[in-house]
Image: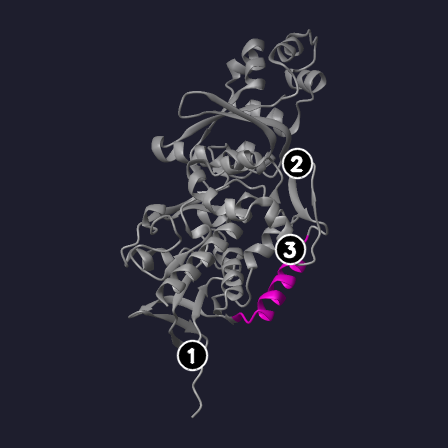
Amino acid sequence: MSQSSPTPVRVAVIGGGPAGLMAAEVLAEGGVQVDVYDAMPSVGRKFLLAGKGGMNITHSEPYAAFVARYRGRSGQVQRWLDEFTPEQVRAWIHGLGIDTFVGSSGRVFPTDMKAAPLLRAWLHRLRECGVRFHMRHRWTGWEGKDLRVATPDGELIVQTDAVILALGGASWARLGSDGAWAPLLGGKGVDVAPLVPANCGFDTDWSEHFSSRHAGAPLTTAALAYRDDNGEMVRRKGQFVVTQTGIEGSLVYALSAPLRDQIAREGKTTVWIDLAPDHSAERVLTEVTHPRGSRSMSSHLQSRLGLKGVKAGLLRECLSAEEYADPARLAAAIKALPLTLLRPRPIDEAISSAGGVRFDALDGGSAMLRALPGVFVAGEMVDWEAPTGGYLLTACFAGGRAAGKDALAWLAARR
Protein backbone atom coordinates (compact mmCIF):
# COMPACT_ATOMS: atom_id res chain seq x y z
CA MET A 1 0.00 0.00 0.00
CA SER A 2 1.37 3.39 -0.93
CA GLN A 3 1.53 6.05 1.72
CA SER A 4 -0.01 9.41 0.96
CA SER A 5 2.36 12.37 1.10
CA PRO A 6 1.86 14.81 3.96
CA THR A 7 -0.28 17.84 3.26
CA PRO A 8 2.03 20.79 2.55
CA VAL A 9 1.96 23.74 4.89
CA ARG A 10 0.27 26.66 3.13
CA VAL A 11 0.57 30.34 3.91
CA ALA A 12 -1.43 33.08 2.23
CA VAL A 13 0.25 36.45 1.73
CA ILE A 14 -2.32 39.17 1.20
CA GLY A 15 -0.70 42.07 -0.65
CA GLY A 16 2.01 42.03 -3.29
CA GLY A 17 4.04 45.08 -2.29
CA PRO A 18 7.62 45.01 -0.97
CA ALA A 19 6.66 43.76 2.52
CA GLY A 20 4.42 40.99 1.19
CA LEU A 21 6.92 39.84 -1.41
CA MET A 22 9.72 39.75 1.15
CA ALA A 23 7.56 37.70 3.52
CA ALA A 24 6.77 35.36 0.62
CA GLU A 25 10.46 34.91 -0.13
CA VAL A 26 11.31 34.00 3.47
CA LEU A 27 8.39 31.58 3.72
CA ALA A 28 9.19 29.88 0.42
CA GLU A 29 12.82 29.47 1.44
CA GLY A 30 11.50 27.87 4.64
CA GLY A 31 9.76 25.14 2.66
CA VAL A 32 6.23 26.52 2.83
CA GLN A 33 3.78 26.67 -0.07
CA VAL A 34 3.10 30.39 -0.53
CA ASP A 35 0.15 31.93 -2.33
CA VAL A 36 0.20 35.70 -2.88
CA TYR A 37 -3.17 37.39 -3.35
CA ASP A 38 -3.42 40.95 -4.64
CA ALA A 39 -6.44 43.01 -5.67
CA MET A 40 -4.57 44.70 -8.52
CA PRO A 41 -3.82 43.24 -11.98
CA SER A 42 -0.12 43.00 -11.10
CA VAL A 43 2.05 43.21 -7.99
CA GLY A 44 4.34 46.02 -6.88
CA ARG A 45 2.41 48.89 -8.46
CA LYS A 46 3.24 51.48 -5.81
CA PHE A 47 6.83 50.21 -5.80
CA LEU A 48 7.08 50.84 -9.53
CA LEU A 49 5.52 54.29 -9.37
CA ALA A 50 7.78 55.31 -6.49
CA GLY A 51 10.74 54.38 -8.67
CA LYS A 52 9.76 56.58 -11.60
CA GLY A 53 11.90 59.45 -10.43
CA GLY A 54 14.79 57.17 -9.46
CA MET A 55 14.43 54.04 -7.33
CA ASN A 56 15.70 55.09 -3.89
CA ILE A 57 16.23 51.74 -2.18
CA THR A 58 17.85 52.66 1.13
CA HIS A 59 20.28 55.12 2.70
CA SER A 60 23.98 54.85 3.55
CA GLU A 61 24.06 57.04 6.67
CA PRO A 62 25.40 55.56 9.96
CA TYR A 63 23.10 52.91 11.40
CA ALA A 64 22.22 54.75 14.63
CA ALA A 65 21.15 57.82 12.64
CA PHE A 66 19.21 55.58 10.24
CA VAL A 67 17.25 53.95 13.06
CA ALA A 68 16.46 57.35 14.60
CA ARG A 69 14.54 58.32 11.44
CA TYR A 70 11.60 56.25 12.68
CA ARG A 71 11.03 58.69 15.56
CA GLY A 72 8.74 57.27 18.26
CA ARG A 73 8.77 53.80 16.68
CA SER A 74 12.55 53.48 16.41
CA GLY A 75 12.74 50.79 19.08
CA GLN A 76 10.15 48.55 17.43
CA VAL A 77 11.41 49.06 13.87
CA GLN A 78 15.00 48.41 14.96
CA ARG A 79 14.00 44.83 15.74
CA TRP A 80 13.37 44.36 12.03
CA LEU A 81 16.36 46.38 10.89
CA ASP A 82 18.82 44.53 13.11
CA GLU A 83 17.96 41.39 11.15
CA PHE A 84 18.02 43.08 7.74
CA THR A 85 20.21 46.16 7.82
CA PRO A 86 20.53 48.71 5.02
CA GLU A 87 23.81 47.05 4.01
CA GLN A 88 22.07 43.69 3.88
CA VAL A 89 19.33 45.22 1.73
CA ARG A 90 22.02 46.29 -0.75
CA ALA A 91 23.58 42.82 -0.69
CA TRP A 92 20.19 41.25 -1.30
CA ILE A 93 19.63 43.49 -4.32
CA HIS A 94 23.08 42.59 -5.64
CA GLY A 95 22.04 38.95 -5.32
CA LEU A 96 19.24 39.67 -7.77
CA GLY A 97 21.84 40.82 -10.28
CA ILE A 98 21.14 44.53 -9.76
CA ASP A 99 24.08 46.84 -9.01
CA THR A 100 23.67 49.85 -6.74
CA PHE A 101 25.46 53.11 -6.03
CA VAL A 102 25.43 55.78 -3.31
CA GLY A 103 24.35 59.22 -4.48
CA SER A 104 25.76 62.52 -3.26
CA SER A 105 22.96 62.75 -0.67
CA GLY A 106 23.82 59.34 0.77
CA ARG A 107 20.76 57.74 -0.81
CA VAL A 108 21.22 54.34 -2.44
CA PHE A 109 19.90 53.65 -5.96
CA PRO A 110 20.07 50.84 -8.52
CA THR A 111 22.71 51.76 -11.09
CA ASP A 112 20.08 52.21 -13.80
CA MET A 113 17.82 54.14 -11.36
CA LYS A 114 14.84 51.96 -12.32
CA ALA A 115 12.49 49.80 -10.26
CA ALA A 116 11.18 47.52 -13.03
CA PRO A 117 14.34 45.40 -13.57
CA LEU A 118 14.63 44.80 -9.83
CA LEU A 119 10.97 43.75 -9.56
CA ARG A 120 11.24 41.45 -12.59
CA ALA A 121 14.31 39.71 -11.15
CA TRP A 122 12.62 39.37 -7.77
CA LEU A 123 9.42 37.89 -9.18
CA HIS A 124 11.46 35.44 -11.25
CA ARG A 125 13.22 34.29 -8.08
CA LEU A 126 9.92 33.93 -6.20
CA ARG A 127 8.33 31.88 -8.98
CA GLU A 128 11.42 29.67 -9.11
CA CYS A 129 10.88 29.08 -5.37
CA GLY A 130 7.31 27.96 -6.04
CA VAL A 131 5.43 31.09 -5.00
CA ARG A 132 2.05 31.30 -6.72
CA PHE A 133 0.46 34.63 -7.60
CA HIS A 134 -3.28 35.31 -7.75
CA MET A 135 -4.08 38.68 -9.31
CA ARG A 136 -7.39 40.55 -9.07
CA HIS A 137 -8.04 38.60 -5.86
CA ARG A 138 -9.22 40.97 -3.11
CA TRP A 139 -9.30 39.76 0.48
CA THR A 140 -12.68 40.68 2.02
CA GLY A 141 -12.53 39.08 5.48
CA TRP A 142 -13.04 35.71 7.09
CA GLU A 143 -15.39 32.78 6.79
CA GLY A 144 -14.83 31.13 10.14
CA LYS A 145 -11.07 30.59 10.19
CA ASP A 146 -10.78 30.64 6.40
CA LEU A 147 -10.25 33.65 4.15
CA ARG A 148 -12.86 35.17 1.89
CA VAL A 149 -11.42 36.40 -1.39
CA ALA A 150 -13.34 38.19 -4.14
CA THR A 151 -12.19 37.17 -7.61
CA PRO A 152 -13.34 37.96 -11.17
CA ASP A 153 -15.09 34.56 -11.11
CA GLY A 154 -16.82 35.03 -7.77
CA GLU A 155 -15.99 34.56 -4.11
CA LEU A 156 -13.29 32.10 -3.12
CA ILE A 157 -12.85 30.51 0.32
CA VAL A 158 -9.17 29.92 1.04
CA GLN A 159 -7.95 27.49 3.67
CA THR A 160 -4.47 28.21 4.96
CA ASP A 161 -2.22 27.41 7.90
CA ALA A 162 -1.15 31.02 8.46
CA VAL A 163 -1.70 34.43 6.91
CA ILE A 164 0.58 37.39 6.27
CA LEU A 165 -1.32 40.66 5.81
CA ALA A 166 0.77 43.24 3.94
CA LEU A 167 -1.92 45.53 2.61
CA GLY A 168 -0.19 48.88 2.79
CA GLY A 169 -1.52 52.09 4.25
CA ALA A 170 -4.05 54.43 2.67
CA SER A 171 -2.10 56.61 0.25
CA TRP A 172 -2.31 56.21 -3.53
CA ALA A 173 -5.49 54.13 -3.36
CA ARG A 174 -5.51 53.69 -7.13
CA LEU A 175 -2.43 51.49 -6.73
CA GLY A 176 -4.07 49.24 -4.15
CA SER A 177 -3.32 50.83 -0.76
CA ASP A 178 -6.81 51.97 0.20
CA GLY A 179 -6.93 51.15 3.92
CA ALA A 180 -10.04 48.99 3.45
CA TRP A 181 -8.51 46.42 5.79
CA ALA A 182 -8.77 48.67 8.86
CA PRO A 183 -12.45 47.99 9.70
CA LEU A 184 -11.97 44.29 8.97
CA LEU A 185 -9.26 44.05 11.64
CA GLY A 186 -11.03 46.45 13.98
CA GLY A 187 -14.08 44.19 13.86
CA LYS A 188 -11.91 41.34 15.09
CA GLY A 189 -10.69 43.27 18.13
CA VAL A 190 -7.39 44.46 16.64
CA ASP A 191 -6.38 47.92 17.87
CA VAL A 192 -5.85 50.10 14.79
CA ALA A 193 -4.65 53.71 15.01
CA PRO A 194 -6.39 56.04 12.52
CA LEU A 195 -4.60 56.27 9.20
CA VAL A 196 -3.28 59.78 8.52
CA PRO A 197 -1.12 61.32 5.77
CA ALA A 198 2.67 61.18 6.02
CA ASN A 199 5.28 62.75 3.74
CA CYS A 200 2.57 65.13 2.63
CA GLY A 201 1.94 68.71 1.60
CA PHE A 202 -0.09 71.28 3.54
CA ASP A 203 -2.79 73.81 2.82
CA THR A 204 -2.52 77.44 3.76
CA ASP A 205 -4.65 80.47 3.02
CA TRP A 206 -3.19 81.92 -0.19
CA SER A 207 -4.93 84.83 -1.83
CA GLU A 208 -6.30 84.25 -5.31
CA HIS A 209 -3.85 86.86 -6.59
CA PHE A 210 -0.84 84.93 -5.23
CA SER A 211 -1.94 81.38 -6.10
CA SER A 212 -2.92 82.32 -9.65
CA ARG A 213 0.56 83.73 -10.29
CA HIS A 214 2.83 81.38 -8.38
CA ALA A 215 1.21 77.93 -8.07
CA GLY A 216 3.77 75.37 -9.24
CA ALA A 217 6.75 77.66 -8.64
CA PRO A 218 9.73 75.98 -6.92
CA LEU A 219 11.88 77.46 -4.18
CA THR A 220 15.18 75.78 -4.95
CA THR A 221 17.15 77.54 -2.21
CA ALA A 222 15.20 77.99 0.98
CA ALA A 223 14.94 76.75 4.54
CA LEU A 224 11.98 75.97 6.76
CA ALA A 225 11.86 76.19 10.54
CA TYR A 226 9.23 75.21 13.10
CA ARG A 227 9.02 75.15 16.88
CA ASP A 228 9.07 71.60 18.27
CA ASP A 229 7.11 70.34 21.26
CA ASN A 230 9.93 71.43 23.58
CA GLY A 231 9.81 74.97 22.24
CA GLU A 232 13.08 74.61 20.33
CA MET A 233 13.38 75.89 16.77
CA VAL A 234 14.14 73.15 14.24
CA ARG A 235 15.50 74.32 10.88
CA ARG A 236 16.23 72.47 7.67
CA LYS A 237 17.44 73.66 4.30
CA GLY A 238 16.19 72.26 1.01
CA GLN A 239 13.63 72.73 -1.72
CA PHE A 240 9.87 72.94 -1.87
CA VAL A 241 7.09 74.04 -4.20
CA VAL A 242 4.21 76.48 -3.87
CA THR A 243 0.93 74.80 -4.87
CA GLN A 244 -2.53 76.12 -5.60
CA THR A 245 -3.49 75.48 -2.00
CA GLY A 246 -0.24 75.55 -0.02
CA ILE A 247 3.21 73.99 -0.07
CA GLU A 248 4.70 70.58 -0.83
CA GLY A 249 8.01 69.01 -1.83
CA SER A 250 10.97 67.25 -0.26
CA LEU A 251 11.70 69.87 2.38
CA VAL A 252 8.05 69.95 3.47
CA TYR A 253 7.83 66.17 3.51
CA ALA A 254 10.88 65.95 5.77
CA LEU A 255 9.06 68.03 8.41
CA SER A 256 5.55 66.78 7.76
CA ALA A 257 5.17 64.40 10.71
CA PRO A 258 5.64 66.95 13.51
CA LEU A 259 3.74 69.62 11.57
CA ARG A 260 0.81 67.25 11.02
CA ASP A 261 0.75 66.32 14.69
CA GLN A 262 0.80 69.98 15.77
CA ILE A 263 -2.14 70.76 13.48
CA ALA A 264 -4.04 67.78 14.90
CA ARG A 265 -3.58 69.15 18.43
CA GLU A 266 -3.89 72.88 17.84
CA GLY A 267 -5.89 73.28 14.63
CA LYS A 268 -3.01 74.99 12.81
CA THR A 269 0.73 75.54 13.05
CA THR A 270 3.34 78.02 11.87
CA VAL A 271 6.51 77.54 9.85
CA TRP A 272 9.10 80.21 9.12
CA ILE A 273 10.60 80.41 5.63
CA ASP A 274 14.18 81.59 5.16
CA LEU A 275 14.20 83.05 1.66
CA ALA A 276 17.95 83.75 1.75
CA PRO A 277 19.44 80.76 3.56
CA ASP A 278 22.95 81.39 2.26
CA HIS A 279 23.10 84.89 3.78
CA SER A 280 23.30 85.85 7.44
CA ALA A 281 20.64 88.05 9.01
CA GLU A 282 23.25 90.80 9.27
CA ARG A 283 24.06 90.56 5.57
CA VAL A 284 20.39 90.65 4.64
CA LEU A 285 19.77 93.72 6.78
CA THR A 286 22.77 95.45 5.23
CA GLU A 287 21.51 94.77 1.72
CA VAL A 288 17.93 95.78 2.46
CA THR A 289 18.99 99.07 4.02
CA HIS A 290 21.53 99.87 1.30
CA PRO A 291 20.51 103.10 -0.44
CA ARG A 292 18.24 102.29 -3.37
CA GLY A 293 17.69 105.70 -4.89
CA SER A 294 14.66 105.79 -7.14
CA ARG A 295 14.38 102.02 -7.48
CA SER A 296 11.34 100.23 -6.07
CA MET A 297 11.87 97.93 -3.11
CA SER A 298 11.12 94.87 -5.27
CA SER A 299 13.80 95.93 -7.79
CA HIS A 300 16.16 96.64 -4.92
CA LEU A 301 15.65 93.18 -3.37
CA GLN A 302 16.20 91.50 -6.72
CA SER A 303 19.40 93.47 -7.31
CA ARG A 304 20.90 93.10 -3.84
CA LEU A 305 19.64 89.64 -2.77
CA GLY A 306 18.33 87.95 -5.91
CA LEU A 307 14.80 87.85 -4.51
CA LYS A 308 12.32 87.71 -7.37
CA GLY A 309 9.44 85.66 -8.67
CA VAL A 310 7.81 83.44 -6.07
CA LYS A 311 10.13 84.64 -3.28
CA ALA A 312 9.19 88.26 -3.91
CA GLY A 313 5.57 87.19 -4.15
CA LEU A 314 5.73 85.45 -0.78
CA LEU A 315 6.95 88.62 0.89
CA ARG A 316 4.04 90.58 -0.56
CA GLU A 317 1.61 87.78 0.33
CA CYS A 318 2.63 87.28 3.94
CA LEU A 319 3.54 90.82 5.04
CA SER A 320 1.35 93.83 5.54
CA ALA A 321 2.10 97.00 3.60
CA GLU A 322 3.45 98.52 6.81
CA GLU A 323 5.81 95.60 7.44
CA TYR A 324 7.01 95.58 3.84
CA ALA A 325 7.81 99.30 4.04
CA ASP A 326 9.87 98.95 7.22
CA PRO A 327 13.43 97.87 6.20
CA ALA A 328 14.22 96.23 9.54
CA ARG A 329 10.99 94.21 9.62
CA LEU A 330 11.35 93.34 5.96
CA ALA A 331 14.91 92.08 6.49
CA ALA A 332 13.78 89.98 9.45
CA ALA A 333 10.95 88.51 7.37
CA ILE A 334 13.33 87.56 4.56
CA LYS A 335 15.14 85.35 7.08
CA ALA A 336 12.01 84.14 8.92
CA LEU A 337 8.79 84.69 7.01
CA PRO A 338 5.88 83.26 9.03
CA LEU A 339 3.40 81.03 7.20
CA THR A 340 0.37 79.46 8.85
CA LEU A 341 -0.42 75.88 7.82
CA LEU A 342 -4.05 74.89 8.23
CA ARG A 343 -4.28 71.20 7.33
CA PRO A 344 -2.34 68.38 5.67
CA ARG A 345 -3.35 67.45 2.16
CA PRO A 346 -5.71 64.45 1.80
CA ILE A 347 -4.20 61.08 2.63
CA ASP A 348 -4.65 59.74 -0.90
CA GLU A 349 -2.23 62.42 -2.16
CA ALA A 350 0.42 61.61 0.45
CA ILE A 351 3.53 59.63 -0.37
CA SER A 352 2.82 57.37 2.59
CA SER A 353 0.60 57.12 5.64
CA ALA A 354 1.00 56.84 9.39
CA GLY A 355 -1.20 54.94 11.81
CA GLY A 356 -2.33 51.36 11.39
CA VAL A 357 -2.05 48.26 13.55
CA ARG A 358 -0.63 49.35 16.89
CA PHE A 359 2.42 47.53 18.18
CA ASP A 360 0.51 46.79 21.40
CA ALA A 361 -1.83 44.63 19.28
CA LEU A 362 1.08 42.35 18.36
CA ASP A 363 1.93 39.27 20.35
CA GLY A 364 5.09 39.51 22.42
CA GLY A 365 6.94 41.79 20.02
CA SER A 366 6.40 39.47 17.07
CA ALA A 367 4.44 40.31 13.91
CA MET A 368 1.48 38.12 14.93
CA LEU A 369 -1.80 39.69 15.98
CA ARG A 370 -2.66 38.86 19.58
CA ALA A 371 -6.37 38.74 18.73
CA LEU A 372 -5.86 36.48 15.71
CA PRO A 373 -3.27 33.72 16.25
CA GLY A 374 -1.67 32.71 12.97
CA VAL A 375 -2.30 36.09 11.35
CA PHE A 376 0.79 38.27 10.89
CA VAL A 377 1.10 41.87 9.68
CA ALA A 378 3.88 43.65 7.83
CA GLY A 379 4.73 46.86 6.05
CA GLU A 380 2.98 50.19 6.02
CA MET A 381 -0.21 48.84 7.60
CA VAL A 382 1.64 48.73 10.93
CA ASP A 383 1.75 51.93 13.03
CA TRP A 384 5.14 53.40 12.08
CA GLU A 385 6.28 56.05 9.62
CA ALA A 386 9.48 57.35 8.11
CA PRO A 387 10.67 60.17 5.87
CA THR A 388 11.52 59.66 2.23
CA GLY A 389 15.11 58.75 1.44
CA GLY A 390 14.96 54.96 1.39
CA TYR A 391 13.73 54.60 4.97
CA LEU A 392 10.18 53.60 4.04
CA LEU A 393 11.26 50.90 1.63
CA THR A 394 13.97 49.49 3.90
CA ALA A 395 11.52 49.11 6.79
CA CYS A 396 8.99 47.45 4.49
CA PHE A 397 11.63 44.96 3.33
CA ALA A 398 12.83 44.31 6.88
CA GLY A 399 9.33 44.17 8.38
CA GLY A 400 8.18 41.71 5.73
CA ARG A 401 11.19 39.55 6.39
CA ALA A 402 10.48 39.61 10.13
CA ALA A 403 6.85 38.64 9.59
CA GLY A 404 7.89 35.71 7.41
CA LYS A 405 10.34 34.48 10.02
CA ASP A 406 7.80 34.88 12.82
CA ALA A 407 5.25 32.89 10.81
CA LEU A 408 7.76 30.09 10.20
CA ALA A 409 8.59 29.94 13.91
CA TRP A 410 4.89 29.83 14.84
CA LEU A 411 4.20 27.07 12.33
CA ALA A 412 7.18 25.04 13.52
CA ALA A 413 6.01 25.28 17.13
CA ARG A 414 2.63 23.84 16.16
CA ARG A 415 4.01 20.76 14.42
The residue that appears at 61% across and 65% down in the rendered structure is 125
The residue that appears at 60% across and 48% down in the rendered structure is 88
Disc 3 on helix, strand or loop? loop
Asked whether, in this view, residue 220 is left or right of residue 9, the answer is right
Corner quadrant of residue 155 = bottom left
Name the residue beneath numbered marker 1. Answer: 6
* Start-end of magenta stretch: 114-132
Residue 180 visible? The answer is: no
On residue 407, the disc is none
What whole-number distance in Å separates the C-alpha atoms at marks 2 and 1? Answer: 53 Å
Name the residue beneath numbered marker 3. Answer: 115
Disc 2 on helix, strand or loop? loop
Name the residue beneath numbered marker 2. Answer: 105
What whole-number distance in Å separates the C-alpha atoms at marks 2 and 3? Answer: 19 Å
Q: Is residue 215 above or below residue 49?
A: above
Q: Is residue 351 above or below residue 151?
A: above
Image position, residue 274 (x, y; %) = 58, 22
Q: Is residue 168 above or below residue 78?
A: below
Image position, residue 159 (x, y; %) = 37, 73
Image position, residue 35 (x, y; %) = 48, 70
Q: Is residue 10 magenta?
A: no
